[in-house]
Amino acid sequence: MTAYVVPLIFLSVLFLSVLRKKNAYSAFVKGAESAVGLMVSVLPYLLAVMMACEVFRTSGASGVVADFLSPALEFLGVPGECTELLLLRPLSGAGSLSILENVFSVYGADGLIGQCASVIYGSSETIFYVSAIYFSKSDVKNLRYAIPLALVATFLGNIIGCNLCRLI
């Protein structure tokens, strides 16, 4: 079924453009042209977020913070081996994928640690990356609550998800 979704969307757009007597090709080219401008304007924000994430990870600061927070998170139901993943997931997709692969190679994917790592990786987003893209192009300039609320919601969702893994 899912193999037909993209062709169905493509054919629907083509059919609607013919029905409304619009030039689908020129609309596509115009959209692609605006996408290039978007990438140029967003690039500085993305570079800043990526650099900060990489510095946090390669400096060893993420490991130190993870070791410090591990006992408290274990009390809340998150295995200590997943603490660094919990910290890095909002920052970096590639960095957290690397940690997830390491968790799978050391502890396996079927045990509690692997399941919790899967829940943390799969149910959360790279908040700072998405925020950098979204807020760079929106009129919203006051980010007072957006990022802290996203971080709290992600944190609570991960704790609940890990505790559900314990029950299953």
Image: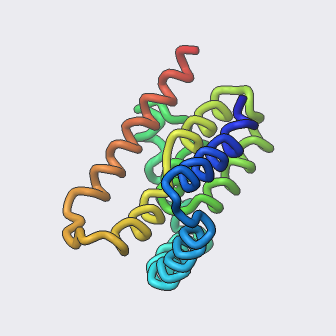
In the rendered image, the residue lying farthest to the top is 168
Q: Is 168 on the left-hand or right-hand side of 102?
A: left
For the question of whether residue 126 can be seen, the reply is yes
Q: At x 48% / y 74%, what residue is drawn? A: 49
Indicate the quadrant containing the N terminus: top left, top right, bottom left or bottom right: top right
Q: Position of residue 138 (x, y in %)?
A: 31, 69
In the rendered image, which quarter contains the C terminus?
A: top right
Q: Residue at x 49, y 45 (%)?
A: 124
The part of the image, by quadrant, that contains residue 142 is: bottom left
- Whether 113 is drawn above or below 27: the answer is above
Percent across and percent down for residue 69 are: 44, 49
Residue 67 coordinates in the image, percent (x, y):
52, 53
For this rendering, which residue is in front, 14 or 158? 14
Q: Is residue 107 above or below residue 100?
A: above
Total numbered badges shown on the rendered structure: 0
Q: Nearer the viewer, residue 150 or 100?
A: 150
Can you give x and y, in whole percent of width and height, for residue 45 in the image? 44, 79
Going 54% across and 69% down the picture, which residue do you hit? 27
Residue drawn at 63 percent across, 37 percent down: 118
140 sits to left or right of 132: left
Name the residue nearer the viewer: 6 or 83.
6
